[in-house]
Image (spheres, rainbow, N blue to C red):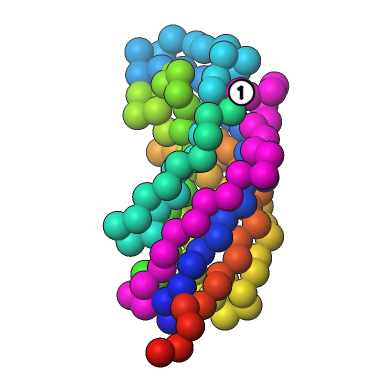
Amino acid sequence: MSGKIVIKPIYATITDSKIQDHNGSSGDLKQIDSYCKFSVGSKVEKTSVVKLDGKVSEWREEIIILEAKEQDRCCHIQFKEKARYWFDGCRGETKIDLAPIMTCGKMTQWFHLKNRKNLTAEILLDITFEPSPCV
């Protein structure tokens, strides 16, 4: 089933307080500007950059819309740092199975984000699927 995936990121929380760059140097959590990158198939969208408040990033009224084709099975999410304390700039990532969202139409849930197999952050997303009209 094809249609629009509407994603509203609400909060991201850092669960791993150790911030180190690829040389092992420590960073300061308050200096991190973070954003999320979402991709479905070849479509990619990013949120605005927000300041980290302690260990929490909050987006206000931000909405990401991605077109999903019938063959698209997952949404790849990356929680990234503009300051790039991590080697690849990615604080954590995950893939979300789109099938339950396409079936139910809506889901609000916390998702675990991992970097190098370690849980580093969690993100609360409100996701809605709007099917394409039948032709």
- Graded by Cα atoms within 10 Å as few (under 14), some (14 to 19) or many (20 or more), the crowding at tag 1 reads some
Which residue type carries mark 1? Lys
Q: What kind of element bears circle 1?
A: strand
Q: How many marks?
A: 1
Judged from this view, the residue extending furthest toward the bottom is 135
Image height check: is 111 above or below 129?
above
Q: Is residue 61 magenta?
A: yes
Residue drawn at (53%, 44%) of the image:
113
Q: Is residue 92 magenta?
A: no
The quarter of the rendered structure image containing the N terminus is bottom left
Image height check: is 109 above or below 135?
above
Q: Is 24 in front, or is 128?
A: 128
Q: Is residue 49 visible?
A: yes
Q: Is 11 in front, or is 114?
A: 11
* Residue 23, image x, y percentages: 35, 13
Residue drawn at (67%, 44%) of the image:
61
Residue underneath mark 1: 51
Residue drawn at (40%, 38%) of the image:
116
Q: Quadrant of residue 25?
A: top left
Query: Going by the image, does 69 lie left or right of 8?
Result: left
Query: Going by the image, does 22 lie left or right of 85?
Result: left
* Residue 84, image x, y percentages: 42, 21
Residue drawn at (53%, 29%) of the image:
49
Image height check: is 118 above or below 33?
below
Q: Is 64 in front, or is 56?
A: 64
* Residue 117, image x, y percentages: 44, 43
The residue stretch that appears in magenta: 51-71
The quarter of the rendered structure image containing the C terminus is bottom left
* Residue 22, image x, y percentages: 35, 19
Q: Is residue 118 visible?
A: no
